[in-house]
Amino acid sequence: MSVEQARVIELPKIGAPQGNLTFIEGGGEENGSVGHIPFAIKRVYYLYDVPGGETRGGHGHKTLEQLLVAVSGSFTLVLDDGRERRRFFLNRSYYGIYIPPMLWRELEDFSTGSVCLVLASAHYDEDDYYRRYDDFLRAARGEER
Ligand code: T46
């Protein structure tokens, strides 16, 4: 897997004087539609009350696909495929970052009061994690052979 396969997805934005509305439809075989993202949504979680400047993440996933959205505030997402790193600054509620499996991720520089919404392709499974960077690196480099 390469960091080049991560991508920004622009989501629909319905603007009105009363405020904006953004929606996300899951894709994949389960609902038969293309959707806005390339997987069926199995789990939704969100990070909030993160102290300003804090860092989260620091792990990789074997199979999980995710979409991250800064629904409020901002943070920086750093993706690493074991060879190169790519940084994304998220500060708009209508842009998501699609993260394919086998990328190490770190979330940095949360602004105070920010909320990171995450749509995931599978239920929570601790066995899907690489929690140690050297384990991730070994697996990512093994994948290249
Ligand atoms: C990711 C970033 C963006 C659960 O019980 N269920 C869940 O769905 C999740 C995501 C976590 N947990 C438990 C596991 C840990 O005991 O919550 C605790 C904190 O999880 P973690 O340290 O993995 O949280 P983050 O913010 O570092 O990472 C999370 C996701 O795990 C990860 O997939 O990409 O958010």
Image (cartoon, rainbow, N blue to C red):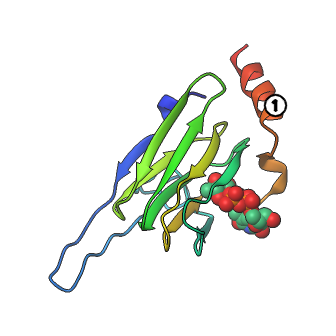
Q: Position of residue 129 (x, y in %)?
A: 78, 47
State whether residue 145 is above or below residue 53: above
Above or below residue 18? Residue 27 is above
Q: Quadrant of residue 102?
A: top right
Residue type pointed to by label 1: Asp
Please count the marks in the image. 1
Q: Is residue 82 above or below residue 126?
A: above
For the residue carrying disc 1, how many other residues have a C-alpha within 10 Å: few (<14), some (14-19), or many (20+)?
few
Q: Quadrant of the N terminus?
A: top right
Q: Does dot 1 land on a helix, a strand or a loop?
A: helix
Q: Quadrant of residue 40?
A: bottom right
For this rendering, which residue is in front, 57 or 36? 57
User: Considering the image in quadrants, where does the C terminus appear?
Assistant: top right
Residue 65 located left or right of residue 19: right
Residue drawn at the location 70% of the way across and 43% of the way down: 63
Residue most extreme to the front: 53
Q: Residue furthest left?
A: 17
Relative to 101, is 52 on the left or the right?
Answer: left
Q: Is residue 90 left or right of residue 124?
A: left
The reply to whether residue 121 is visible in this rendering is: no
* Residue 31 or residue 69, whichever sits in front: 69
- Residue 3 lies left or right of residue 10; in this view the side is right
Query: What residue do we see at 49% from left, 50% from top?
Result: 76
Q: Quadrant of ligand 1?
A: bottom right
Please say if 118 is above or below 48: above
Percent of width and height locating residue 8? 39, 45
Residue at label 1? Answer: 134
Q: Residue visible at 26% across and 66% down?
A: 13
Q: Can see residue 76? A: yes
Q: Position of residue 41 (x, y in %)?
A: 56, 62
